[in-house]
Image (tube, coloured by chain):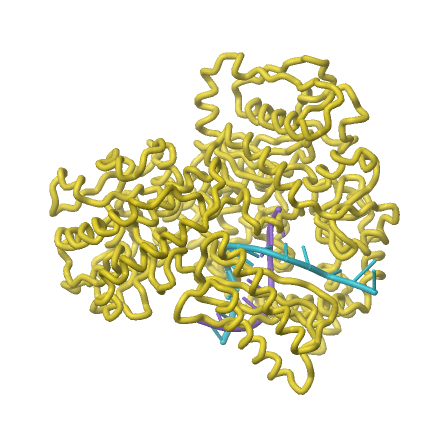
Chain colours: A yellow, B purple, C cyan
Amino acid sequence: LDTLEEKNVITEEGFLSRMALNDNKAGMEGLDRDKINKIIMETSKGSRFYENELKRELQVNQRIEKMMLQKAQITEQQLKKAQAEVERMAASMEKSRDLSRVIVHVDMDAFYAAVEMRDCPELKDKPMAVGSMSMLSTSNYHARKFGVRAAMPGFIAKKLCPDLIIVPTNFDKYRAVSNEIREIFALYDPHFQPLSLDEAFLDFTDHIEQRKSWPESLRTHHYHIIKGKPPKMNQWLPEDKDLSPVLFEDSPVSSPSLPCSGAAAGAVEVFGTSVEEAVREMRFRIEQKTMLTASAGIAPNMMLAKVCSDKNKPNGQYVLPSTREAVMDFIQTLPVRKIFGIGKVSEKMLNALGVSNCSHLSQQMALLSLLFSDTSWHHFMEVSLGLGHTFIPRHEERKSMSTERTFKEMNQTDQQLALCKTLCQDLAGDMKKEGLQAKTVTLKLKNVNFEVKTRAQTLLYAISTEEEIFAAAKELLKTEIENESPQPLRLRLMGVRVSAFVTCDDKKPTQRSIIGFLQASKNDKQRQSEKEPQQSFFQRAHALRLQLQTESSKSQEEANGETAPTSVSSGVLTSKEESETVHASTSGCEEQKAETLTCPVCFQPVETTDLNIFNRHIDACLHGRPDKPNRSMIVDSDSDEDDVENHLMVPISNVRGKCEVEKEGEESWLNRIPPQKDQFQSVQKVFLISEEKKPSQQTGSCNSKSPALICPVCQCSQETDDLNVFNHHVDLCLNQEVLLELRRPTIPSARNTNNSSKQASNYTY
DNA sequence: ATACATACC
DNA sequence: TACTGGTATGTAT
């Protein structure tokens, strides 16, 4: 105990890692770290925040200490065995490498700060940041030279740079710009994935394929030259240096002929057909439209693209060629901290093992496999091989929603309860906007010493109103107050979160039906254009649901009780569920060979037990690669090919919530039956998979002759293993529901990242 | 299911 | 004077 504390006191480094400057950010190279850290420490020392950080630092150090002890006990033999395992895994992962996709990560430069500078020319030469004295969202590059960066409180930033101008955030403006750039993203990949207001992943593969045959006219772009228009008009004068925001005087220039350098009035630029040119063109459009610059990374997968976009920031791009050699070279020198998912703590732990860049990562993999969890070291492994996702997932369903507030010390019970009520009110409002119903309520408290507590309660039924949320939150809060009494709770923050949603249209703890799920995927298709209010749909859906429930639910309630069948839940097989599926099929089933897993897309056995590899296979299938194991039409052996029409077909991409079907056009899913064989998968198979992952619902073993299949529509359990019988039941249910659902109008997207009120949290760190 | 920690923007 | 807010996920129990 004493040794640890002493160590921390003696080794100042230990403390510094939490409090010290993160210069792991573009525009912060070659700063006088020591000087900056000294100022940060002097300003922070003795504060409650600082004391809490010290405490947490100590915890991390203890964790590391433990890890080192563990390391010391590893025998030569264990290490050898681990090494063999690691090599086997590496070979296996290597097989799944896919260099055929072109993934782009785009990221606006100092986004909020750049917007503010654009709109206020006075700021252009000055160090500035967006935020408040309490917290900064981002800073411009001038300010970064002083060590001022995102996630730094303004008052410390002022110490580092007394001339710093702090501009309050203006989210509506950033959202508007975000919509503008997203329109451009969509031109290159209609299924792009926004990560935040200013950042997105795009799959350029299809675009560049088409682009090859484009005439020059389609690749020719004009500079906007209309004079005297305000920035709002999206026009600007390249030659008018006073109006253009001089964001980056000394920015690295990746391409000699950047769009805006020295372009004359009325000039045009013709972009080539290569990926680089296409991305350059996209950035050109962004700059012309918004007067703001973006940086981009081009690579064979998302993990690499993200790293690459940072490489030539600001206003630059970086291409990582799609060859194994280029990827491996690139990876070797890459500091682990640059990898998405490796933060302060993981970095520190890895550093303690002598791992600071990715080449160390592969060298120490055997050791890492013994010291870290499977998920962690598998991730490390993928990174060290330069592997990452090669297709871009659709934005998934939200899993939680929360609101929290920081304030001056509050220690009065009545005030605390009142605030809690307000938070619940706000949250209920937000939930209503998305038509959400949740079963879990979590209260978050942070006391004046920055210690955070969370207290959760899961209810039997889903809730959505202010009163319902408050009823739960109040109890949690009261308990905490009682636990502390006679001392009062001295709070500096309170938050309320809801989670465990019952997919939108039903208070019952059941799942959304296949129909609703298909309908939702149709919404996604429209998510970019449509912006109708959504309340009416959910009200309507609720009524429909109630009607349906009264007609077909008496038996189901008895059959299922509170524990609704899982798996097809929410209509989407999440990756976690897939893993469980996999797990069930390996451990639950004696007939299944331990070394193979069955792909839920192509239903072919995959020779691995590693979920990462297996997932990669599924990715490939979902993407429908010609060179990869492809999705294939599986018709149940008992049924005829003609039976296809009588089955409910699920777009296979939606099984995992992907959006490939969107390419199919606008017609309703009902009109698409029978579907294109290679794009749909018989839904019974999906249910079968679902069942496999719940062996407990069966008589315990896969050999059981009468598995209870659960109808995805009415939720009742069907005592049959005959798919035809089961299908018949499902069809009956569906017919009933289809009739109801058909009367309902087009539904706007429930999770449009564009206009979600919850997007205010997109900081540009 | 709960609590807490880490990570991202 | 002053160290955020929103979401997801990992880890441990």
Q: How many marks?
A: 0
Q: Where's residue A593, x and y in %?
A: 25, 55
Q: Which residue sits at x=61%, y=68%?
A: A63
Q: Where's residue A109, x and y in %?
A: 68, 37
Residue in the foreground of this view, choosing between A199 and A505? A505
Q: Which residue sits at x=58%, y=44%?
A: A196
Q: Which residue sits at x=84%, y=57%?
A: A38
Q: Where's residue A735, x and y in %?
A: 21, 49
Q: Residue furthest right?
A: A162
Task: For residue A568, say whether it is visible.
Answer: no
Q: Tell me: residue A119, above or below residue A733.
A: above
Quadrant of the image for the N terminus of chain A? bottom right
Q: Where's residue A355, x and y in %?
A: 61, 53
From the viewer's perspective, is A206 left or right of C4?
left
Q: Which residue sits at x=50%, y=72%?
A: A472
Q: Tell me: residue B2, above or below residue A572.
A: below
Task: For residue A213, say whether it is visible.
Answer: yes
From the viewer's perspective, is A558 left or right of A350?
left
From the viewer's perspective, is A455 left or right of A133?
left
The quarter holding residue A6 reads bottom right
Residue in the foreground of this view, choosing between A125 and A470? A470
The quarter holding residue A411 reads bottom right
Residue in the foreground of this view, choosing between A215 and A749? A749
